[in-house]
Every structure is written in structure tokens, then in C-alpha cells.
Image: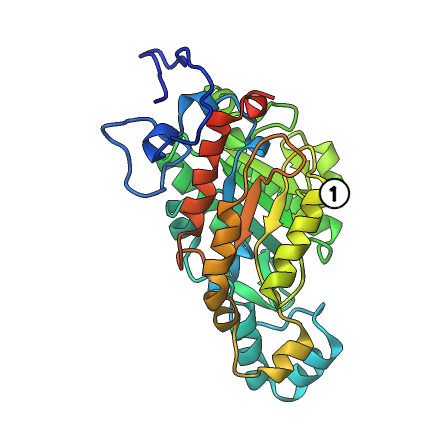
Amino acid sequence: MCSQSPGGQTGSSSPRSSYSYSMQDLFQKCDNQETGNKQWMSNLCAELWDVPLFNLSIPGSHDTMTYCLDKLSPVDPSSSKLLLFFEKYVPSITRSIILRWSTTQVLTVTEQLNAGIRYLDLRIAHRPDVFSNLYFVHGLYTSRTVEDILHEIEDWLQHNPREILILGCDNLGSLSSEHHMCLINSIHRILGPKLCPKHEQPTLRNMWKQNYQVIVGYDNPLAQWFDYLWPSIPYWWANTTKTRSLIHFLEMRKLIGRPDGFFVAGLNLTENLSYILKHPFGSIKRLTLPELPYLCKWVQKQHPGVSKDATNIIAEDLIGSDDFVSAVIKLNMKLLDRTDALSK
């Protein structure tokens, strides 16, 4: 069992040779402990407080904001020419198809965070039919603005002061310099003191001590000029509709070796235009749901840490549909038996 003094210091302990830990070993005993995974970082065993977050196992959501895609919005101009052609002549049918295949999440941001998600995959763009404000995009644009969601995140953090979030701001190629500055200023204005500078060691103990709660990975060279913007977080994307091909891709990436910092293993299936045309009445939900048990078995075989084949953030679609979040969090128990992974 993890030992902790009243002052919060970890007691002496010795490595254990067998995986005899339970979830009570992973989490501290706490009279006010939240049920489920809402505050899993707050309750994490004190032996793991000095492990960098990029050596922990963290659950994430793929295309976080697709639960609020707007069917009446324009189609993303980066979509295929054929899809844009259909949109021009049969927009209502085309948008219905895009909506079904682009909706990877059904829970709101707050619901995802309450479920234990700590990495948000945020695809940000300027919506062409709206003069101001930035939105999220995946085939279609969202009805919620970026500022709306940043305020929602900030409010959740206020109520969960010892939880840490990692925001992946990716696919920003459509943003102009003016849009980038607008987005960067919004991040700083809303999240301000909670933003962890990139020179800090991102451990739970260090971030709690300084009241940091957010790490922002920003996919643009402008990030280098802002201390509170971390480099873009690599995302391992298989780009396949086949589950076995997805797993094979991830295993091949593990053979190459993990990056030194944060990275995401994308446990998500992806349709292409050819697949959509063959399955016009299908959806990402119909494609993904039957495969979740198989994908969860792969998760259970992973481990965090510093070794070449370790995983860090694992992101999935349809959060709340299975035991994915708990399975990813539980991988951190393996660190209690791997002394090489602690405090590196």
C-alpha cells in the first residue's frame, strides 16, 4: 500500500516483484474520494507524484469537440473535391452523411472530463460563414466557439484544482496569423495562471505546488515565442478502417520507439471517401462500437514509463461507451513495479 505522511511526503517503500496491486494501491485512501474517475489524478498514489506526465498513462479523447458539430455549417473546404461537389448540389444529404461519419464523441467536454479524460484533441479553424470567433472542425464546423469551450474548461478546473489537462491544438493550417494571435490571446486570457510553462518539469507534485493545471501543445512555429505554449504533441494515426491494421500500425510505431516527451497513440478507426460511398448509411459509431472490446484488450497490454515501447496518452472515440478510461488509468499501477520509470 502507498504510504504518505500527513505532510504529503511519500514514506519509504521497496519495489514489489509481482503485480499484486489493486486500484486501492494506485489511488490514495481518501474519505472524500470522488466516485469513478472524475478526480483520478488528485487521488493518484503519492509514489507517482514525481513521475513526469509524459511517463504516465493518460486517457484522451479523439476529435473531442465533434459532439456539437453543426449540420447547417459549411463543409470543411479541406474535404475531398468529390465531397465538395456533392455538397454543392445535394447539401442536405451530403451534410447528413458527413455528420454521421464525423461525430466521434457524444459526451460534452465537461462530461468527458468527469469521465476521466485528461487529453483533449482540439481541431480549431475559422468558420467561413461567421465573421468573427474561432470554432472547431471535423468535416463540419461546431456550434460552440473556442472561447465558449475554454471558459467551460476553466470552470471545470476551478472545481477540480488538482487535476491536470493536456490540450492538443492541432490541424491549425487554415488559420491566418491574425487568427493565431486571436487564439493564443484567448488561451492566455482565459486560462492564464493555470498554464504550465514549457521549461517546467510536468510532474503532479511540481504543478500542484505552483497551481498549474494546463499544458497546451500548439501546432505552429509561433509556439516557440510563447513560454506557455508547448511544442505540438505527436499523434500516432493509423488512418484505417480495419482494427487489426490499426493495432499493427501502433505496434510498429512502438518498435521504432516513443518520443521523449508527450505523444498520443490514436486508438481510433478512420473512414475514407471510398469507404463512405460504400456505406452511405453507416457512421463512425457503427464502425467503432463492435471493435471496442478488442481495442480495450490492446490497452490492457500496454505500460507507461521510459522504455522504448511505453505508451503515454491513449486516445479513443466514443468516450463513455466502454471501460477504456479506467483501463488506461489502471496501467499506471505497472509503474509501481518498475523502479526505472519513476522520477526520470
The 10 Å Cα crowd at callout 1, few under 14, some 14 to 19, many 20 or more, is few
Give the quadrant of the N terminus: top left
Question: 112 or 14, which is in the foreground?
Answer: 14
**Height in image: 215 above or below 95?**
above
**Height in image: 161 above or below 144?**
above
Residue pointed to by mark 1:
256
Residue at the outermost bottom position = 89
Whether residue 171 is visible here, answered yes or no, is no
Question: 64 or 223, which is in the foreground?
Answer: 64
Residue 323 in the image: x percent, y percent?
40, 52
Amino acid at dot 1: Ile
Give the quadrant of the C terminus: top right
Question: 304 or 149, which is in the foreground?
Answer: 304
Q: How is the image coloured?
A: rainbow
**Height in image: 193 above or below 275?**
above
Determine which quarter of the picture holds residue 218.
top right
Q: Residue at x 68, y 79 (%)?
A: 274
Label 1 element class: helix
Residue at the outermost front position = 18
Residue 141 in the image: x percent, y percent?
57, 65
How many marks overall? 1
Left or right for 111, reference 92: left
Left or right for 44, reference 284: left
Q: Residue at x 67, y 44 (%)?
A: 254
Residue 246 in the image: x percent, y percent?
63, 59
Determine which quarter of the picture holds residue 259.
top right
Residue 89 in the image: x percent, y percent?
66, 89
**Height in image: 341 above or below 145?**
above
Whether residue 259 is visible here, answered yes or no, is yes
Question: 134 or 290, which is in the foreground?
Answer: 290
